[in-house]
Structures are given as structure tokens and as C-alpha cells.
Amino acid sequence: MPSNTLTLVLAANRGTGLEPLTIDRPKAAVPFGGMFRVIDFTLANCLHSGLRQVLVLTQYKSHSLHKHLRDGWSIFNPEFREFITAVPPQQREGLNWYGGPFDAIRQNRYLVERSAASQVLVLVGEAIYRMDYAELIRAHRESGAQVTLAVRGVREPGSGVQPLVGLGADGRVLALSPAPVDGVPGDLDEPLSTMGVYCFDKSWLLAALDPAREGPDEDLGLDLIAPLLGAVNACGYRFGGARGRVTPDRYWCDLASIDAYYQANMGLLRADPPLDLYQADWNIRTYQGQYPPARTVPGAASGTEGIFVNSMLSAGTVISGGGVNHSILFPRVRVHDGAIVDSSILFDGVQVGAGANLRNCIIEKDVQVPAKERIGFEHKHDVERFPVSAEGIVVVPKGYRF
């Protein structure tokens, strides 16, 4: 059944809520969990769900994302009409870039038309979750719906405020509305929201791609489906349903802010994490450089052994006489003699100088933190130099020079 499905992954979003992490990369390419990129979770779901025809619609500063797709996801065989292909704007109908998710699909209408698929799966490639899309597709076909939306309880693990969905007793979608500004409405026992996962009958989707359409183009559910609810058979599919293979935790996070991003990463360090990266039957694929194993060594000056406690260390990382606690270190990080890293996320190639002290930080790729530097201890001094989130997480941007 998945072989009769064309998959479109929306990965053109700038992700302004994650700035400065998205100054030089799209949201889908932001590093996550010590070795992954955000888009790896959606593509791993496609891989395990048997989906082998995947178009990734890209736009904003897409070079790093294209490189990652080439290096980590060139795994399908085109001889069997399998592919994961990046599709930046082709300007086939004018000189405009993608104006939003609806416009991105509309501009690639020709790719949908020439596909032999009978249904089109549209996914947002900028959220962290595991999901068996094959079960959603099966539910879509069995229901006879023209559109099927994946929905989740907004009080379930994870974060993000998405449009709210009202379902009838038969699973039909009765309403789609923006989420209230303050989050979960208080008068609903089990409020449901969209997840950026939609299964369309191909013929219905092509008919809905009206090139003359006007109006907002920010959310596919609100802007494409909601105005047509009276004329379309739309059903909801509950995330983590009884037949889903990999969603007992029902975890989903859209990383809408620096604080959401930080908490999602720190959650991986819990004894019982809300999202288990070590689930053997649904591994998350990515590109990994050919680096030596992470290790600790005694500091050259002090002779003190490097240590780490409740942390993730990726390949090529060396803790040389320093200490790391409750932190996530991406590849090739160096923590030098006497340096302390606590409750922080250090991206690829970060150097932490001797005696430096970092707390509640996100340090961007290749930043060199000088010896004796202190970050995360004096709020006034931090905000004078760096972006600081609402919850006090300090972000040292890429290219920062102390």
C-alpha cells in the first residue's frame, strides 16, 4: 500500500522561533539529540513505513539540508523508482518562491500529476516524533475519506500549539480552528490538534490546487482543508492508534521556540525519556562523519581525569581533564582541563577552553569558548552579549568571536 503513495515533505520553513539557530540553516536542518538533524525523524518514519517515493520541498538557506540529504539519505534505488529528492522552487509558473505550504505543493503540481500514486502523503519535516505512516494510509483507504488528518491530544507528551480539531463520533472532521493564544482550552476533556501529517486522495488534492486561490498560506489544515470542510469527506486519525507500531509514547514536538528545543533535548537525558532514541525496532537514520570514538583523558596540566555524568557524547568528542554533566555534545567537541559544562548543548566542533564554565547554554557549531569564560551565570552580562530565551537559555551564535 505505501508503494502507491507519493510523499511530500515540507522543509522550506525558516523557523524564526529557533533563531539564532536558523540564521544559516532551515529549521529542518537544525541539529538535534547529539547527532541527528530534525528532518531525520520524518524521513526515518518514511523509511520504516515503506515509503520509497519522497520529495523534500526546500527553500530557505537550503544548502546544508541538501548536503545532509545527499550524504545521509541517498539510500534508495532509482532503478526501482525509489527516491528521496530535494525540490527547491522551480519557478515553473512565474518568478515567485514558495509562498507557504499550499503554494509549495501547488508549484509542484506537475510532480503530483505525473506520479502513478493514488494518494499523496504531506508531512511537515520540522517536528520530532515517531509514526507508522502505513497505518494512517490504511485507515485513510478503509474510511473512504478524501482527506485524513493525523491528530494528537494536546496534553500528551511533547510540546507545540497547533490548530485544534473537532471530531464527530464517526471520526469525521467537523471543525478546524486556530489554537487559542494561551494554549489548551479549559472546557474540553480531550482537545485534539493537528500534527502536520495529511493523507490526500490524489484526485481531490489536484482539484483543490486552484492557482487562482487567494488568502493566507501558513497552515495546510487551516488554509486548505478548513474552508472546504462542508464539501470534503475528511477524517481524523489518532496518533498512536491501536494498530500503530511505534508510538506508545505519543511523543510529538514541533520545536517552536528555543525553550521548546532545549527542553526536548534535555528530555532525552531523563532515566525514562519521553522519546527513546534507543528503540531498536525503529532506529533514526542520519549522516555521521568518520570520527574516532568519544573518550575522556587526563588534563595535560592537572593530570585530572575527564569525567561526564548523565550526558550524551558523540563521536570525535574528547573531555581532557574537564567535566560534563547533564549535557549533550555533538561530534568533535573538546572540553579542556578544568572546564565545566552543565545542562548545555554543544554543537559540532565546539572548543571549551581550560577553566571555562558553561551552564544552561546552547553553543553553535565551531565556536571557540576562551579559557576562564563564564556563560549562564550572570544574566545581565549574558544578555549584553548573546540571545537569551524567555526561560534563561543562553545561545552563543555561529561565528561569535569573544
Image: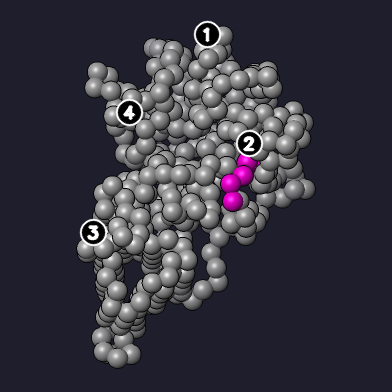
Q: Position of residue 62 (x, y in %)?
A: 60, 51
Label 2 to label 1, Cα distance in Å?
28 Å
Lower sequence index among marks 1 and 3:
1
Is residue 355 among the parts visible in the rendering? yes
Quarter of the C terminus within the rendering: bottom left
Lower sequence index among marks 4 and 3:
4
Amino acid type of the residue that numbered disc 3 sits on in the rendered structure:
His
Which of labels 2 and 3 is toward the front?
3
Instruction: Check residue 98 in the rendering and tell me which mark sits there, or answer none.
Output: 2
Whether the residues at callouts 4 and 2 have beta carbons within 8 Å, the answer is no
Label 2 to label 3, Cα distance in Å?
39 Å
Label 4 to label 1, Cα distance in Å?
26 Å
Q: Position of residue 77 (x, y in %)?
A: 72, 50
Q: Where is residue 178 in the image (x, y as percent from the top left)?
A: 40, 23
**Residue pointed to by mark 3:** 379
Q: At 31% from the left edge and 50% from the top edge, which residue is drawn?
A: 389
Q: At 43% from the left edge and 70% from the top edge, which residue is drawn?
A: 401
Label 4 to label 3, Cα distance in Å?
28 Å
Amino acid type of the residue that numbered disc 4 sits on in the rendered structure:
Val
Q: Can you say whether 274 is above or below 333 in the image? A: above
Whether the residues at callouts 4 and 3 have beta carbons within 8 Å, the answer is no
Whether the residues at callouts 1 and 3 have beta carbons within 8 Å, the answer is no
Q: Can you say whether 280 is above or below 372 in the image? A: above
Lower sequence index among marks 4 and 1:
4
The magenta-colored residue range is: 55-61
Count of numbered circles on the image: 4
Badge 4 element = loop
Amino acid type of the residue that numbered disc 2 sits on in the rendered structure:
Tyr
**Residue pointed to by mark 4:** 181
